Amino acid sequence: MRTGISVEEALTLVLREAQGELSVEEVPLREAYGRVLAQDLASLVNHPDQDDTAVDGYACRREDTLGASWESPVRLRVIGESPAGRPFAGRVGQGEAVAVYTGAPIPQGADAVIRVEDTRREGEYVLLLAPASPKDIRPQGDDLKGGEVYLRRGDLLTPGRLGLAAAMGYPRLKVFRRPRVGILSTGDEVVEPGEPLPFGGVYNSNAYSLLGLVQEAGGEPVLLGKVEDQPDRVLESLEAAGPLDLLLTSGGVSMGEYDVVRKVLEQVGEVVFWKVQQQPGKPLLLARLRGIPVLGLPGNPVSSMVSFFLYGRPFLFQLQRRTDPPYRSLRAKALTPFKGAQDRKAFRRGVLSFEGELVVRSTGNQSSGVLRSMALGNALVALSPGQDAQEGEMVEVIPLTFVL
Ligand code: AMP
Ligand code: MG
């Protein structure tokens, strides 16, 4: 077992556990939003499927319209029209034009379009007040070329990508099964919201902030409830969890006599590391239990959320072969001081905004028991060991992407 390791080492060890293959399922487009593609998608069509017009106007032969102007308009005979979806069947000859509407194919014989704004209609004739040009013709395949891959395995299906999959002609998509993530809360003092709060009790907030974090990262949360700080109770629950891709426990991994999660995992599982040089979340633990990776999150509400964000989320991204990074670093100007930790990397909670430049302010009390900081904040301010940031200093900021 490793102990007292750096944030970087801890992340490497966590990602090493994310080697499993998620099975693949096929879903109709209407259920695919927010899922992760398990196949590369090559376009089944050209878009536009043939040269079409980007404007409402008239299609004609460019050479017939050279020199057209307000002073000396060119007169063409309108031989038909081509609304979108109903192409004109004939051919445009010399001195002729076809009325076209955005998205309609360019009729045969025409090689230019004039916008309706630059024309005047006179019965079966149209007067062109400027030359027609090919610039408003969208060539076949301008947007999508048949056979070309535009979306890849591991791409999160955002609204734009979902539309793109539809535009490419796919009614159903192969996506990865959502990873199942067990959430087990431990602690004699922990009670469910709705129950009366006994003296010294605390409502179980971790289960629900983790539930949100797991869903936001594409996982399917499996709430395993709460157990007391007794080794056999903890063991029972761990074993009853059923098939999981990741197990999260909260609480019971610190130094205390009643921190039984660590003891149980040491006995029946295999602890990979315990304690990371970070604040909050120092007692974080990684273990394996019957082939399932276990992230033992500290009980403090901020510690458990920050630790999940820094390690659990990247784990789930890797398992889903996600092509986007689990988080990004930006630089912003600190508008309040941020205090670091002597011997560890610190992750403070801040509110990031743009005020002519990126700026970040502290959410206030930075104690790891103050969950309000995670509800108010939209970013972590990352400070190296020993680094204190003064007002006006540039700092590293990691947006908590689930609130952006
Ligand atoms: P522990 O890591 O078990 O030492 O717990 C650290 C702190 O987090 C204690 O103050 C606990 O009461 C609190 N805590 C533990 N589990 C939860 C939970 N599920 N929800 C909210 N607070 C918790
Ligand atoms: Mg405890």
Image (cartoon, grey):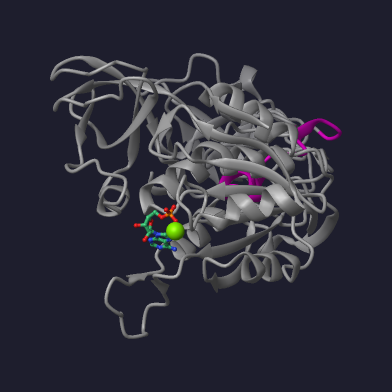
Query: Magenta residues?
Result: 146-164
User: Percent x, y for residue 289?
Assistant: 76, 52
Residue at (39%, 70%) from the top-left corner? 189
Between 290 and 120, the one lying in front of the other is 290
Q: Is 401 on the left or on the right of 152, as rendered?
A: left
- Residue 272 position by quadrant: top right
Vertical side of 66 occupied by 15: above or below: below
Between 343 and 302, the one lying in front of the other is 343
Between 379 and 287, the one lying in front of the other is 287
Question: Dividing the image into 4 quarters, which one contains the N terminus?
Answer: top right
Question: Dividing the image into 4 quarters, which one contains the C terminus?
Answer: top left
Q: Quadrant of ligand 2?
A: bottom left
Q: Is 22 in the magenta?
A: no
Residue 12, can we see it? yes
User: Percent x, y for residue 197?
Assistant: 30, 80
Count the labels in the image: 0
User: Percent x, y for residue 373?
Assistant: 26, 48
User: Percent x, y for residue 323?
Assistant: 67, 33
- Residue 311 position by quadrant: top right
Q: Is 163 in the magenta?
A: yes
Residue at (25%, 44%) from the top-left corner? 367
Residue 218, can we see it? no
